[in-house]
Amino acid sequence: MHMYDNLHDAVLAWYDREGRDLPWRRTRDPYAILVSEVMTQQTQVARVVPYYTRWLARWPTVAALADAQPADVVSAWVGLGYNVRALRLQAAARVVARDGWPRDTAGLLSLSGIGPYTAAAVSAFAFGERVAAVDTNVRRVAQRIGTTPDDLLPQRRHVDWNQAAMELGATVCTARAARCDACPAAPWCASRGLVPAAPKPARGPRERFAGSDRWARGRIVAALVAGHGMPAEIEPVRLERLLAALERDGLVERTHEGVGLPRRPR
């Protein structure tokens, strides 16, 4: 008997009732799951869903993505942020199309742009490996309960548990507050009623993002996708520095014809 059996039962029953119906939760296809995991890195789920749907309609298999033009891949990604993720995803797809899918966390870690969380998530959700997929939400939930994600992992329904723990951290046991009155884990939680709301930052995320290098890089790539000239609001010295960084990342190519989206896989 697991010491957290009652907690598991309560959280899994809550997840069965309250879990969001996200399209990647309805598949065991490792490619579709990988796309969702890369897209949701540092991007809100609600924003990802339409991109995910369009992406899989255009490139429904790992082989299709492997054969795509890099410029098309970057263009389809624009708006999600961190555009280099698109090229890393395609690089991983090319390896899988050639060699097949690694079927465990250790093998998945060998793919381009795949870190420990993403490897564990794909391994668990696609191949059923009993491994804790530990993102910031799962880590927070475990810490507040007073244990570790590995110790919380149940023997049964471990795949659903990973989804449930993520859902709990994303919707109830959030970073800025904990809705203990709505939390199915509250009776077993060491932090119940003790998590203060974090103070609001002086500026919101959008205000902090506007004007940053990441914002400017996104403006440059979006301008190239749209067929426009370089953004006039980015001064020439900064523009040159950012173009050099984008070129190193493979997001732009510079030829005698000028600056453009990548035409060749890296």
Image (tube, rainbow, N blue to C red):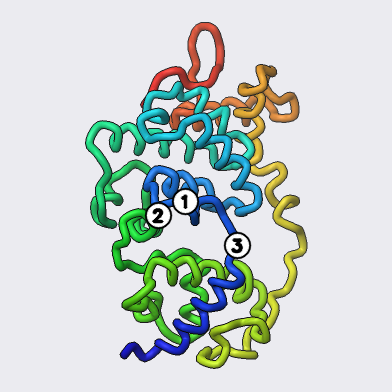
> Is 119 drawn above or below residue 87 in the view shown?
below
Q: Is residue 95 left or right of residue 238?
A: left
Q: Residues within 10 Å of mark 3 (few under 14, many from 20)?
A: few
Query: Which element carries disc 1, helix, strand or loop?
Result: helix
Is there any visible trace of residue 213 in the rendered image? no
Q: Is residue 98 left or right of residue 168?
A: left
Question: Which of the two discs, 3 and 2, labels the residue nearer the N terminus?
Answer: 3
The C terminus lies in which quarter of the figure? top left
Viewer-proximal residue, 188 or 135? 188
Q: Residue type at mark 3?
A: Arg
Question: Which of the two discs, 1 and 2, labels the residue nearer the N terminus?
Answer: 1
Which disc, if any, is residue 46?
none
* Residue occupying the point 36% across, 68% down: 132
> Is 36 drawn above or below residue 230 in the view shown?
below
The residue where tag 2 is placed is 118
Farthest top residue?
A: 256
The residue where tag 1 is placed is 37
The N terminus lies in which quarter of the figure? bottom left
Is there any visible trace of residue 261 in the rendered image? yes
The residue where tag 3 is placed is 20
Q: Is disc 1 in contact with disc 2, using a CB cutoff of under 8 Å?
A: yes
Q: Residue 74: x, y in percent? A: 53, 29
* Residue occupying the point 59% across, 51% down: 43
